[in-house]
Image (spheres, rainbow, N blue to C red):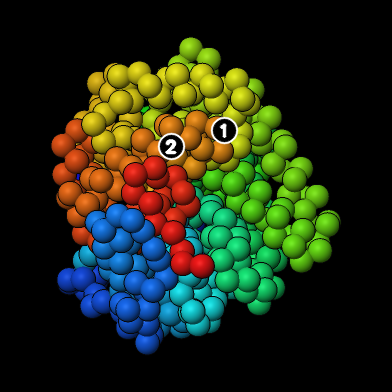
Amino acid sequence: MKRRQFITLTAGGAALSPWLAPWATAATDNEGAFDPGDWGGITMEEIRALFESDHKEASELMEDIMGKCVLDRILPPMPPMTQNWVYPGGPHYKGQWIWDSMFVVDLLSLLPGKEKVIQDIFKNYWDFQDRWNKQMPDYARDMVVGTIKTAPQPPRRFSQIPILAWGVERVYRRNGDKELLEQSLGRLEKFHDWYWRERDVTNIGLCAVGSYSGKVQHARWETFDYECNMDDLKLTVHPTRKGAQEGEWYGDICVTGNTSYLIMGERSLVRLAEIVGDKEMAARRQKRIDKSVNAMREHMWDEEKGVFLSVKRDSLEKIPVASIGSWLPLTAGVATPAMAKRMAEVFATPAWQTPLPVPTCERTDPRWESSGFWRGDVWPSTNYQIACGFADYGFKEIAADIADKTVANAIKNGIHEHYDSVTGKGLGIEDYCMSSTIGTMMLDGLTEKYTVKLRK
């Protein structure tokens, strides 16, 4: 079943837990996509003046990205959000996501006078946190929902890839907004603490997925939706906590992707805490990083596969399929140099060398399909992050190959949500916000052929 079909079928439904019942309102999603947002006085001439490139098509692509994937995606307040917010695009993605929005604010922070808009976007998460905390028992408090859905859709009851701290750091590095740091650091630490408490329920340092709705597919939506490593996912009660209001909310698979992303977020939080002089916070977060890195190396690394694998939560048995999340430990700095070298070797094999890299599932798996939703297709956002990981470990040629092929394909086939890994055909929503990472690859110096730089 396609993701958007499932959204339609499961948007409503009462919560399994009594303390979620007041949130179970009817979902009558408005038809059609929202109109593009107001650029807030920014002109295309100002966008062009930001960048320089020797490659005409790269320049034009960067301009399209800034206009269609960034500025068009900033909408005015819409209940329950009382601030400006990020709309991913298309007729079905009506809400502000965590993962998607961080790539937008990263590029938005290049533009002058956007500090308040970016603060608004983050304040939507903190406002949700406050509303959520009024309804929830102590252990569930401080979650940030994966998507703040627009009314009258019911609130989601699960989170998403935890890179809010990474997003705050990217913004700060670009525009130096210390007010954003002051508003965000305490909230981010509480969110990270919720993540460890409610997703690392065996306290080993590895994150599973879950959902307070008790729906397995909702739990999968916390990470890469239909990743093959989660085909046998089940939800259980908490392994140690007992109580009358407990439910089957906790996934029995610890995933490489979200564990890596939480480490990335913690690394950002350490650096941000050091910037504001909070040594105690930095030390607290570093302990979390060290524990999780050691756990991933010990339990998720597979020398034969040459990548990190997801594991069963209770037995730590490896799930023998390599998927897109298997590469994220590079981005999070989890791999040792020897592991990274082995990963580079594996990446060069036919299992991963599709015409358009990086497929979301290894081609040797029988479930692989070149256009399969997180089961063989290609996403610019993960390509960007995997290219960053390879570059960080010194494999700059691999990074450039991933980035240049991604950019060349977008020039040929347009900006899309995701792509067929064999034909390069665009799939999903056109001008999707998260595909702004095609431009970020160029700006971050990951490409070799298609280079775009900020004017000095």
Q: Amino acid at mark 1?
A: Tyr
Q: Quadrant of the N terminus?
A: top left
Residue at image x 55%, y 32%?
394
Residue at image x 61%, y 37%?
333
* Image quadrant in which you'd find residue 336: top right
Residue annotated with mark 2? 399
Q: Is residue 341 above or below residue 247?
A: above
Give the Cα separation between the discs numbered 2 and 1: 10 Å
Q: Nearer the viewer, residue 46 or 227?
A: 46
Residue at image x 66%, y 48%?
267
Residue 291 in the image: x percent, y percent?
Answer: 71, 36
**For this view, does 344 lie left or right of residue 136?**
left
Q: Is residue 316 above or below residue 200?
A: above
Residue 444 in the image: x percent, y percent?
Answer: 48, 52
Residue at image x 38%, y 51%?
451
> For the residue labelled by badge 2, is the local secondary structure a helix, a strand or a loop?
helix
Residue annotated with mark 1? 393
Residue 113 in the image: x percent, y percent?
Answer: 50, 82
